[in-house]
Amino acid sequence: MEVGFLGLGIMGKAMAANLLRHGFRVTVWNRTLSKCDELVAMGAAVGDTPASVVAKCKYTIAMLSDPSAALSVVFDKDGVLEQIGEGKGYVDMSTVDAATSCKISEAVKQKGGAFVEAPVSGSKKPAEDGQLVILAAGDKALYDDMVPAFDVLGKKSFFLGEMGNGAKMKLVVNMIMGSMMNAFSEGLCLADKSGLSPQTLLDVLDLGAIANPMFKMKGPSMLQGSYNPAFPLKHQQKDMRLALSLGDENAVSMPVAAAANEVCPRPPYLQNITTKLINMQLRTGSQAFKKARSLGLGDLDFSAVHEVLKGTGGSG
Ligand SMILES: NC(=O)C1=CN([C@@H]2O[C@H](COP(=O)(O)OP(=O)(O)OC[C@H]3O[C@@H](n4cnc5c(N)ncnc54)[C@H](OP(=O)(O)O)[C@@H]3O)[C@@H](O)[C@H]2O)C=CC1
Ligand SMILES: O=CC(=O)O
């Protein structure tokens, strides 16, 4: 099977390499073209532009940073839309909001092509190991065509129905993950400040009902203040922002997610007012992931939010 692959960041590079290792013929493109070299050494071909990749390949996958990148690669000059058409499929695996997926879907369909959104759960290591969880929605026939590729990239694919459901599911998952990371970081700080060994806390957590791969993998490096990026903090902050916006759209109050993002001590005059007002303050106020980005930590792993929560990153 031949596929195009647009976007060779942390995830895209690992995913394209995996496809190559499993015998797929892959044509890659990346905005910074030099990042294609490693894939070429593994046997990939290179396209000069997204349009040229789509012209060559029946199926093209994208793995890009955010909604603006996803839209740019489709709609800008030399973009996907210039060559998509009858008999071709486009699969965007980036984490974006449902509105972005729907906009791309409509444009691709108008040109006669098929579109599937397929964001993934799982980070750099699962991408390298083909252990992602794929959250797809949209054109079912294209989804079925892509199953051989999804089987290489992931351990399980979900087809979630209408366009936008993949994006929404991914944002719900990452909203939970971002809140958990904040709670975890606070727990490490609390253990430390109250005279307990944070390492012993990790051991205790790992044996109990809330043991999970994220605590196990990130905990030891957080204790060392080491944040080599697997999932960049700037992307987690984007996901919190998009998830909170999804909450707003659906009138779902999410005080935990909002509070987990918050870093400013609440001023006393706000402490006794209604939950609704507090939520407004949290959503418009300084937030932990935002604060971390503003301190220049956006390219580190998202666990670097720990620096803000423990105060060394300079809390607001
Ligand atoms: N890392 C992770 O653990 C996971 C990430 N995700 C999601 O997957 C997506 C990719 O993540 P990841 O690989 O970590 O991100 P990276 O930041 O490592 O890579 C981002 C990619 O997007 C490209 N890009 C950014 N802006 C533009 C633009 N305007 N036009 C064209 N290309 C652009 C970059 O190109 P260039 O090299 O030129 O900068 C790069 O190829 C994100 O949506 C993220 O939220 C999902 C699950 C896990
Ligand atoms: O989006 C990030 C992940 O780890 O999943």
Image (spheres, rainbow, N blue to C red):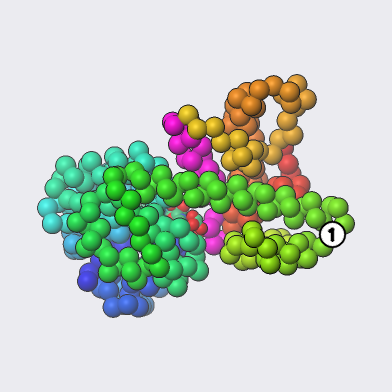
* Residue type indicated by callout 1: Leu
Which of the 4 image quadrants contains residue 197?
bottom right
Residue 228 magenta-drawn? yes
Q: Quadrant of the N terminus?
A: bottom left
Where does the image place residue 36, in percent across and percent down from the top left?
37, 67
Q: Is residue 145 left or right of residue 300?
A: left
Where does the image place residue 281, in percent across and percent down from the top left?
63, 27
Which of the 4 image quadrants contains residue 24?
bottom left
Q: Label 1, secondary structure: give it.
A: loop
Task: Evaluate whether residue 28 shows in this view.
Answer: no
Q: Which residue is mark 1?
A: 196
Name the one closer to the observer, 260 or 21. Answer: 260
Name the one closer to the observer, 200 or 30. Answer: 200
Residue at horizontal 14 percent and vertical 51 percent from the top: 85
Where does the image place residue 142, in percent across and percent down from the top left?
21, 57
Residue 76 magenta-drawn? no
Residue at horizontal 38 percent and vertical 64 percent from the top: 156
Q: Is residue 93 left or right of residue 182?
A: left
Task: Evaluate whether residue 150 shows in this view.
Answer: yes
Q: Is residue 173 left or right of residue 220?
A: left
Q: Is residue 264 left or right of residue 96?
A: right
Q: Quadrant of the C terminus?
A: top right
**Hey, which residue is sitting farthest right in the picture?**
195
Magenta region's main secondary structure?
Answer: helix
Residue at horizontal 41 percent and vertical 44 percent from the top: 168
The residue range painted magenta reads 226-250
